[in-house]
Image (cartoon, grey):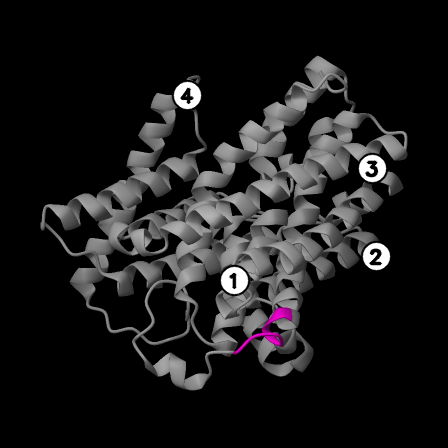
Amino acid sequence: MLQLDAYATLVAATLVLLLGRLLVNRVERLRAFNIPKPVAGGLLVALVLLTLRSAAGLEVKFDTSLQTPLMLAFFASIGLSADLASLKRGGRAVFTFLGVVTGLLLMQNGLGVVLASLMGLDLHMGLLAGSITLSGGHGTGAAWSATFTDKYGVQSAAELAIACATFGLVLGGLIGGPVARYLVKKVQVPGEEHNLDEVPQGFEMPETERRITTFSLVETLALIAISLKGGELLSQGLLGSAFELPVFVCVLFVGVLLRNVLTLLNWHEVSDREVSLLGNVSLSLFLAMALMSLKLWDLASLALPIFVLLVTQTLAMALYAIFVTFRVMGRNYDAAVLAAGHCGFGLGATPTAIANMQAVTMRFGPSHLAFLVVPMVGAFFIDIINAMVIKLFMAMPFLS
């Protein structure tokens, strides 16, 4: 086994990002299907490592201790970008999209339970391969797998949860671009001139140059650090209560609170340029680390019925994005970008959703509404709604 420490892993992550950019720039099919650069580079490296493990018995182990801080810094930047005045403008769209997301959660669990029943599996395994791991991700999967093992006797629930969440993370980054490509053909694209209307803020155009200063960058770093520590303390304070939330949700909430209190009191104007710059760096490095360190052999170990179930869930996600998300959200360019984002966190995670949308907006133009709605719903509301939907299914007679 080749063990890489934190510094070597960081070097590897930056090289993966450069590889992803090279692949997307040179391979037309990747650009045509709007595959995010961290996804392209990270999956190629993961496949190479799988080949090395299979052919030569060599396994590379990364030190991913920086992965969680990078993810939390990304969510802090999302919170610091959330100006309540702008959120008010997108209020109706936020609640409409929340309804769409809730529909997907119900569909994922219903489909999982039905397919598990048809294939003779434990119904709890179908639920585990539903919104728990797909919309919920690794953290939610790990939390519920312990309950399934201890209370319902589901064997290897933890391993199954990790494999399902990994499968979703991979497919969430792969299907968003093709879904958006299909939908964009049906709408009027903003066009190149739309990019000149204003200097892009936030996460829409990550490669656009932004003017920054050393001191303003330090100020923004301080705000992100306060959000990280404040979110950690808030999460610890809520631990064990009815309002218990994941750390990243608390970090995002503290970022939102910090941004808007400072603005309300006129103490400090948060710089969207620096926030978006640091947020995009954190997002890119997090995704590169997450994807290059994927243990794809965990997916290969999935039993055929579970694999069929997950493939069906992936197809259902794509169809839901096309026929529900896109249509309900307005059948326009913003709706197409929202559909790509929904594929990202409907199967994987919010960072994947942002990467999916960036791949689309970098090619076709900004979508202010999509980058306003998806981070708030995908990072904040979805965990609360998902917990309610999971408990609803768990209370049903055939699962209790």
Q: Amino acid at mark 4?
A: Leu
Is disc 1 surrounded by few (<14), some (14 to 19) or many (20+) residues within 10 Å? few
368 on left or right of 304: left
Label 4, on which residue? Answer: 239
Q: Quadrant of residue 271?
A: bottom left
Circle nearer the N terminus (2, 4): 2
Circle nearer the N terminus (1, 3): 3
**Which of 186/77 is in front?**
186
Q: Amino acid at mark 3?
A: Leu
Label 1, on which residue? Answer: 330
Circle nearer the N terminus (3, 2): 2
Rendered view: 117 above or below 337: above
Circle nearer the N terminus (1, 4): 4
Q: Amino acid at mark 1?
A: Gly
Q: CA distance from mark 3 to mark 2?
A: 35 Å
Is disc 2 surrounded by few (<14), some (14 to 19) or many (20+) residues within 10 Å? few
Highlighted range, magenta: 183-188
Q: CA distance from mark 2 to mark 1?
A: 50 Å
> CB under 8 Å between callouts 2 and 4?
no
Label 3's element? helix
Q: CA distance from mark 2 to mark 4?
A: 45 Å
